[in-house]
Amino acid sequence: MDSFFKTVFSILLIISLFFSCRENKKTFFTKNFTHSQWPKDQELVFNFFNPTPGKKYDVFYQISYSPEYPFQNLWMRHQIEGPDGKALAEAKSNMDLFDRISGKPEGQYGAGKIYRYARFQKNISLKDSGLYKIRIRQYMRADTLEGIISAGIVLSPEP
């Protein structure tokens, strides 16, 4: 009977190690804002290490906001820098946070917040291994955005 439990335990251990060591795990980076306010001049910088030359990623914005956010959408600007400090990608993007017609939130509710994800970079190839940076900032007309609880990115490796 003891050998049976040892065998089952060994199999479960191997399975858990296999799934925990997968290279295709998503990586999350988040910055929480004091008093749910995102100042226009506050740039968020997220550093990550790419261990595999030529690895491709999808990159998503991850925003949590309150139902009292005063606008229908959120404009953001992003830049991805390689290990040499040169920009690989740079663009502005618009994310709808509320439906234009009904005014209902576009994201998912949880713990009094609304969470919204939107891809801003598809299949970007990181040709070198090394430290990369992703910079994002809000690009709205307001000096400080009220109701933005946190902002971040999600890196999802391509299989």
Image (cartoon, rainbow, N blue to C red):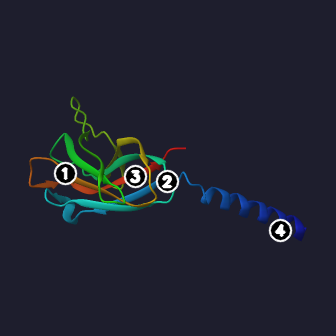
Report how far apart the C-alphas of labels 2 and 3 lie in the structure: 19 Å
Q: Which mark is residue 138?
A: 1
Between circles 1 and 2, the one closer to the viewer is 2
Quarter of the picture holding the C terminus: top right
Q: Earlier in the sequence, mark 3 or mark 4?
A: 4
Q: Earlier in the sequence, mark 1 or mark 3?
A: 1
- The kind of residue on which mark 4 rests is Lys
Q: Which residue is mark 3?
A: 154
From the viewer's perspective, is residue 127 above or below residue 122?
Answer: below
Circles 2 and 4: CB atoms closer than 8 Å: no
Report how far apart the C-alphas of labels 3 and 4 lie in the structure: 38 Å
Q: Which mark is residue 13?
A: none
Nearer to the camera, 62 or 88: 88
- Left or right: 10, with 63 as reference point: right
Report how far apart the C-alphas of labels 1 and 3 lie in the structure: 17 Å
Q: Secondary structure at mark 1?
A: strand
Q: Earlier in the sequence, mark 2 or mark 3?
A: 2
Given the current orientation, which residue lies at the most extreme top position? 101
